Image (spheres, rainbow, N blue to C red):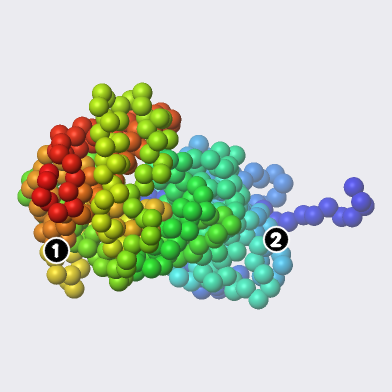
Amino acid sequence: MNGRQRHTEPVDVHLILRRETADGPQVLLSRRAGPVYAAGLWHLPSGHLDGPHEDVVTALVREAREETGVVIDPADVRAAVTVHHRSPGGVSRTGHFFEVRRWQGEPRIAEPDVCDAMEWAPLDALPTGMVAYCRAGLDAYTASARLAVHFQMPGDAIAFDPAADRLRLVPNVADGPGPGGPEAALVEFAERAVGRITRWTDTSWARENSRVWRADGAQGGTWYVKAHQNQRFHGREVRGLRTWAPALGAAAPRLVAADKTLRAVVITAVPGRPLHGVVLGPEREKAVFRRIGALARRIHQSGPARPAPAGSGPAIAKADRHLAAARAHLKLGDEEFVRALIAQADRLEPLEWVETHGDFQLRNILYDPDIPAAPAEAEAGPFLAVIDLERSEPGPAVRDLVRLSDAWADRPDLFEAFRAGYGRALTAAEEARLVVDAALDSVSGIAYGAAHGDPELVERGRRTLARLRAEHRAPLSPTRDAR
């Protein structure tokens, strides 16, 4: 104690009277009128404690009856959120917001001298002209926060202004760094880019140390926040988002912000769900693969092709290490097959380089059957979009067919559909390079899956090697004269 007078401030209560409708939850609002603070603005039914004899629940029940005429059983009152508020004039107070979903009576204007309107408002579309303090409490409630700080600055308006949103959510005990949301530095970075975020949803892949969150904004809007494993992934994704992704329009996310220190990006949300695991009829499948071919063509033609740099052939430098790590999971003859391909790789002619996605597979292609293709596009068919550009970099076009080719294994009709959308057949040199790269990628996947306890990845690599061995028994030919 330093001898100064203890700080004291008013305590008030706010009623979130909630009802469920076919269009979503609604809350009861009243419009203040007469010689009261914030006249003309919408607010929750609310009031102050009458004195030290009254607790906050008793005060809420009393205020609800006096302002709206409804009768509430104290047992039906639920704590929602507490907000520590400071007005633009510098006066602070503590407000307790309570949710009530069951009551008796029909809400009505019971105090016409201080309220001239009362209506139900959608919780996700609150009206303009609300008291900023009240809006802060409802936003914190929507975000499932238990405690929030709303300290306005001198000069701020009493009415809610999105440009001067002072709400700061205090994390709950269970909301620390981890599955519930990103660490504080990532939250700050994202909110600088898009404004306050009220809900974080972890959407990370189950493997590969993925760290991705869906971020829902207080004023509407949805983005994704992604933290990369390393600077290389970060640099490649940022470059892809800034170079070829804009050429795809709605078929790729848009970069909103990037932070090299945090290795993080904020990107726009793209509709649809990953194609991996989607069950389609044969004709729909072919339509989808035609669109995949068209999408690949748009990526590869987003910039001019250029000669391959010297020494940029198949990635055989790591082959010995990957083969050693995968050896225990290879079938008899797999290693010899891969080494034979490596020996033939030197005589393959270099392929031109184009922009590539780098991880072009069904899980990174989103599908939305309810959205038609853009009218400006020549190809009719369902809406598709690409995500996850962290392996994007220039390379031969067949780089994007390595993992995708598993999807049309034993389905030549799907490959033909892809080729129709792509607009051309592969050259003999491209077909030969695809075999080499697919084999090397399979061995790499087996090695990674074995080291990280991912049996699905191991099995996919084994399956791909078996297919390649069955399809390519003769030496590779860049001219199709010996297959």
Residue shown at the point (27%, 59%) measured from the top left = 351
**Which residue is label 1 attached to?**
423
Local SS, label 1:
loop
Instruction: For marks 1 and 2, give the one nearer the viewer.
Output: 1
Give the left or right position of residue 243, taking residue 404 as reference. Answer: right
Locate residue 248, reporting x and y percent.
Answer: 29, 66
| Quadrant showing the C terminus | top left
Residue shown at the point (12%, 51%) measured from the top left = 480
**Residue 138 seen in this snapshot:** no
Disc marking residue 92: 2
Compute the Cα span from label 1 to label 2: 67 Å
Residue sitting nearer the eye, 265 or 351: 351
Locate residue 149, reporting x and y percent.
Answer: 63, 56
Locate residue 395, reporting x and y percent.
Answer: 33, 58
Local SS, label 2:
strand
**Please, what is the three-letter code of the amino acid marked with disc 1?**
Gly
Which comes sooner in the sequence, label 1 or label 2?
2
